[in-house]
Amino acid sequence: MGGGAIDTQSIINKAKKAGCTEIVIKCGKEDIIYHFEGITKSIKIKQLNKVVDSTSAGDSFNGGYLASRLKR
């Protein structure tokens, strides 16, 4: 994205303009930012002291999130 830092609100605004109605931003070691139905929330994450294996960590997050959403 041009090498500069972009804040999460800018990302949310750009995604909304593109037609996204539900936005989840995983910010590495930072909290998760979630935007849905006009409400933006920050979801605290638990910091791990010892990571055993981070292989497919993003895929695992996505799968868990989508499975949770499909249960609604």
Image: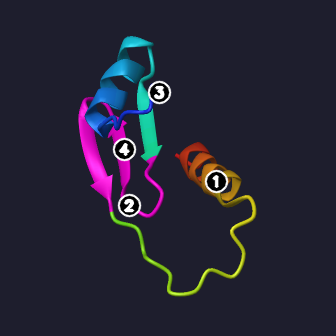
Mark 3 vs mark 4: give the one in front. Answer: 3
Q: Residues within 10 Å of mark 2 (few under 14, many from 20)?
A: few
Q: Mark 2 is on which residue type? A: Glu
Distance between the Cα atoms at labels 1 and 3?
20 Å
Residue 58, labelled with which disc? 1
Whether residue 31 is in magenta: the answer is yes
- Circle 1: element type: helix
Amino acid on which disc 4 is placed: Tyr
Q: Is the residue under label 4 in contact with that under label 3 (CB below 8 Å)?
A: no
Distance CA(mark 1)–CA(mark 2): 14 Å
Question: From which residue to which does the magenta span run?
Answer: 26-43
Q: Which mark lies nearer to you, 1 or 3?
A: 3
Badge 1 vs badge 2, beta-carbon distance below 8 Å: no
* Mark 1 or mark 2: whose residue is earlier in sequence: 2
> Does 19 sit above or below residue 26?
above
Magenta segment, prevailing SS (helix, strand or loop): strand
Name the residue at 47% across, 27% down: 1
Q: Which is more foreground, mark 2 or mark 4?
A: 2
**Image check: 28 left or right of 41?**
right
Residue to which mark 4 is pinned: 34
- Label 1 or label 4, whichever lies nearer to me, is 1
**Disc on the earlier residue, 1 or 4:** 4
Label 1 vs label 4: CA separation?
A: 16 Å
Q: Amino acid at mark 3?
A: Met
User: Label 3, on which residue?
Assistant: 1
The earlier-in-sequence mark between 1 and 3 is: 3
Please tell me which residue is depicted at 42% across the width and 24% down the height of the picture: 21
Residues at discs 1 and 4 in contact (Cβ within 8 Å): no
Residue 20, horizontal then vertical, whole percent = 45, 21
